[in-house]
Image: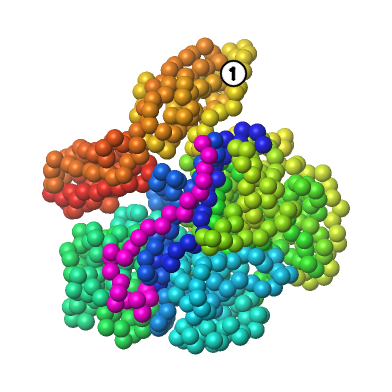
């Protein structure tokens, strides 16, 4: 595989810890903030191996599992883009408060009893509410089984004929009863429900004490696993880091009005009532101020409403406003008012905001799938990546929808379907052009896309579904099942000929069971693609194969994002069959030896805008600005590094800091220009502090902030955010401009997502 070093593998380590998000009622008395610990799974990595990111989980004695994608130096890969919130303009008129209690939109308060299954309650309450809003369920029937979800999440499939056999989470436990306290999160819930394992009605698997449920479920018929009343179609994750930002808050409010509720994680400890909770006239409210952050989140609940004027907390919150929370401890729990309580918009432990959407399970009778445990790894490349699954039809079928995951926000995609596929190329068949569809998902998560025209396939016919992931912020991230890691909890099974991945840079398909990156072969198992449909009403004739391009058409990002998966345009195949080059890569690895093409006829005109010196942090990536007229940067510019152990550079001019030191980057253009850039690499920041000379500024005035990084570190790129742009804005250098009276918070983020904030009053 050529140019392998430009591809990175984001390795998501399996569930290695008791989760964060289910409050274990038996352990409640012993729970304190000091019990929270971090656990990082290690992977041996050679110096020349592709860049690795791990799913790092947070461990405590509760049950909700939180994770982040980090490399070995602790740098965090954000799935969230700074542009996502700005692009998603509010389309609803939002009231100052919304409270569904006592209405037909209210689903009852549940009780998780002696279990740590709050993650199942949070997810299913959100799904119930969505189906209630759509009229799929009524207030009387909106009761889905948390027992079913929690049990089958941690019990492996025993049907050896199933394509999902061998895919399961293998976390150690001593008894079936203990499986209800193993922890989980929205990620786990979406993976299980996406298999069409549930959701079933509560009556099919009633919730009870852990021991009673275990004794019933271990003797249940194997067919119970695949029963469904509601089929999950979408689950979308909202950016947790800017939840106090008014734009992000409005997105969450709009989602609640649309779907009825939203699953969320937070820090919750009923034994610390005097510290975190205040009772006034029967109302309980929480603001954990700066003591408990996302890393301490240990409980999953459901947001069902809000009040912008609420400000009755045990500790003064920055501003008024709170979410109405439905808990899962029953209606008589002492620290809740009939099962509800309020949490400040600014509570720093709030995270993992997820919506869950569903349809009636009989909408699609047929499902083709290989992934039974969701995605755990992600391939990351500087150019677009395609991934595909090849299936064999069991009986004549009508294919109607395709489902897949996205890792990053604002993700452009294309779906293509091929019939009568043969060989080791999933596009070696007849492309059904009328079924191709492109779009953009503004949020990360699991999505179902209706294809514009159903595809009919014959009994025994091989067909393929190809998903193209275009670049976002100069890289494409493709979720795959990933490597087997039974020690840490994720087990996968795949066979050659099922799943493939295509890299635009060398125009070749690779079987997922044997992808080689930088000389290291990975078994990344199956692509996470599912196909839904129904048996055909009459037999379908086998299609006679016709010649088609071997490369699926390139996806150009649509101008407007869509969170619903609504088709934006239908793609057309490239006349040349060759992929179009994309933006500069963000995975800055050393380029292969190459020469600059001759500047025939003065075709290329270049301009070097790069500065003479740059100081960056370890793991940080920057693009050196060079413009080319008449062709591509790759063809017109040669890049070299004097010390690739310190700083590497791609043939698109993306520099990555590898270790502390100094390196010279030489830029040589085809039209005779040459410049040497000095790059100094320092440590990655462990923290950042933002300060200002004043805490108050007058309307219409400006104020320059100052940032201080931990000693010996650097972050060339800093991102500044205002919590309320109507009150004050902040530019890329940290200069605040006061617009109207009020209080605003200014946030700053480093490239590795370390953050700080200040509070400014506009007078």
Range of the magenta residues?
23-47
Spot occupied by residue 80 in the image (x, y as percentages of width and height): 43, 50
> Residue 37 magenta-drawn?
yes
Spot occupied by residue 427 in the image (x, y as percentages of width and height): 74, 47
| Quadrant assignment, res 346 | bottom left
| Quadrant assignment, res 547 | top right
Going 77% across and 63% down the picture, which residue do you hit?
Answer: 393
Q: Dot 1 corresponds to which residue?
A: 596
> Residue 361 magenta-drawn?
no
| Quarter that holds the N terminus | top right
Question: Left or right: where does residue 560 sit relative to residue 530?
Answer: left
| Quadrant assignment, res 252 | bottom left
Spot occupied by residue 428 in the image (x, y as percentages of width and height): 78, 47
Q: Is residue 479 above or below residue 694?
A: below
Q: Is residue 347 above or below residue 609?
A: below
SS category of the residue bearing label 1? loop
Nearer to the camera, 138 or 486: 486
Going 54% across and 71% down the picture, which residue do you hit?
Answer: 153
Q: Mark 1: give few (<14), some (14-19) or many (20+) Cα within 10 Å.
A: some
Going 71% across and 70% down the picture, which residue do you hit?
Answer: 160
Does residue 50 show up? yes
Going 37% across and 69% down the picture, which residue do you hit?
Answer: 61
Nearer to the camera, 45 or 160: 45
How was this image coloured? Answer: rainbow
Does residue 570 show up? no
Q: Is residue 540 above or below residue 413?
A: below
The number of numbered discs placed on residues in the rendered structure image is: 1
């Amino acid at each position: 595989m050529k140019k392998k070093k430009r591809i990175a593998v984001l390795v998501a380590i399996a569930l290695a810890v008791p989760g964060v998000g289910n409050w274990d009622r038996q352990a409640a008395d012993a729970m304190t903030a000091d019990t929270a610990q971090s656990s990082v799974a290690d992977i041996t990595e050679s110096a020349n191996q592709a860049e690795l990111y791990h799913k790092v989980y947070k461990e405590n004695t509760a049950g909700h599992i939180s994770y982040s994608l980090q490399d070995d130096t602790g740098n965090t890969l954000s799935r969230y883009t700074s542009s996502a919130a700005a692009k998603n303009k509010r389309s609803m008129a939002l009231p100052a408060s919304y409270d569904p209690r006592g209405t037909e939109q209210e689903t009852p308060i549940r009780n998780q009893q002696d279990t740590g299954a709050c993650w199942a309650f949070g997810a299913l309450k959100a799904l119930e509410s969505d189906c209630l809003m759509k009229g799929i369920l009524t207030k009387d029937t909106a009761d889905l089984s948390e027992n079913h979800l929690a049990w089958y999440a941690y019990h492996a499939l025993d049907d050896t004929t199933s394509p999902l056999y061998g895919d399961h989470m293998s976390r150690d436990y001593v008894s079936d009863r203990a499986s209800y306290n193993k922890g989980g999160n929205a990620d786990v819930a979406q993976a299980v429900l996406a298999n069409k394992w549930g959701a079933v009605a509560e009556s099919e698997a009633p919730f009870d004490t852990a021991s009673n449920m275990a004794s019933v479920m271990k003797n249940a018929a194997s067919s119970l696993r695949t029963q469904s009343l509601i089929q999950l179609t979408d689950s979308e994750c909202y950016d947790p880091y800017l939840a106090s930002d008014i734009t992000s808050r409005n997105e969450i409010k709009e989602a609640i009005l649309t779907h009825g509720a939203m699953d969320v994680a937070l820090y919750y400890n009923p034994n610390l009532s005097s510290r975190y909770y205040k009772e006034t006239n029967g109302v309980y409210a929480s603001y954990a101020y700066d003591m408990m952050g996302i890393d301490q989140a240990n409980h999953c609940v459901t947001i069902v409403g809000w009040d912008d004027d609420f400000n009755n907390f045990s500790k003064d919150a920055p501003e008024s406003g709170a979410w109405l929370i439905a808990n899962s401890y029953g209606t008589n729990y002492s620290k809740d008012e009939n099962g509800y309580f309020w949490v400040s918009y600014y509570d720093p432990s709030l995270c993992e905001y997820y919506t869950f959407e569903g349809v009636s399970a009989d909408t699609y009778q047929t499902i083709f799938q290989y992934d039974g445990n969701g995605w755990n790894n992600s391939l990351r490349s500087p150019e677009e990546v395609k991934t595909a699954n090849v299936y064999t039809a069991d009986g004549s079928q009508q294919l109607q929808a395709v489902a897949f995951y996205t890792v990053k926000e604002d993700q452009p995609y294309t779906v293509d379907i091929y019939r009568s596929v043969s060989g080791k190329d999933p596009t070696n068949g007849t492309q059904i052009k009328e079924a191709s569809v492109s779009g953009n998902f503004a949020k990360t998560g699991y999505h179902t896309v209706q294809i514009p025209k159903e595809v009919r396939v014959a009994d025994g016919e091989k067909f393929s579904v190809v998903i193209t992931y275009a670049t976002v912020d100069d890289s494409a991230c493709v979720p795959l099942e990933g490597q087997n890691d039974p020690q840490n909890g994720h087990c996968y099974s795949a066979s050659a000929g099922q799943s493939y991945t295509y890299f635009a840079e060398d125009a070749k398909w690779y079987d997922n069971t044997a992808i080689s990156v930088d000389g290291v072969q990975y078994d990344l198992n199956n692509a996470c693609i599912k196909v839904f449909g129904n048996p055909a009403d009459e037999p379908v004739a086998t299609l006679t194969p016709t010649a088609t391009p071997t490369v699926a058409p390139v996806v150009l990002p649509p101008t407007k994002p869509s969170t619903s998966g609504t088709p934006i345009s239908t793609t057309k195949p490239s006349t040349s069959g060759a992929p179009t080059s994309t933006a500069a890569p963000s995975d800055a690895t050393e380029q292969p030896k190459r020469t600059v093409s001759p500047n025939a006829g003065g075709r290329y005109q270049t301009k070097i805008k790069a500065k003479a010196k740059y100081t960056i942090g370890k793991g940080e990536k920057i693009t050196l600005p060079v413009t080319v007229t008449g062709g591509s940067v790759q063809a017109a510019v040669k890049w070299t590094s004097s010390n690739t152990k310190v700083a590497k550079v791609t043939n698109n001019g993306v520099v990555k800091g590898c270790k502390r030191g100094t390196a010279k980057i030489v830029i040589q253009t085809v039209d005779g220009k040459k410049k040497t850039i000095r790059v100094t690499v320092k440590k990655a920041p462990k923290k950042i502090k933002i300060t200002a000379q004043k805490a108050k500024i007058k309307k219409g005035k400006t104020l320059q902030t100052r940032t201080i990084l931990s000693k010996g570190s650097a972050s060339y790129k800093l991102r500044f955010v205002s919590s309320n742009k109507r009150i004050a804005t902040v530019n890329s250098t940290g200069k605040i401009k006061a617009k109207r009276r009020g209080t605003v918070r200014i946030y700053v983020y480093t490239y590795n997502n370390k953050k700080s904030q200040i509070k400014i009053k506009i007078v």
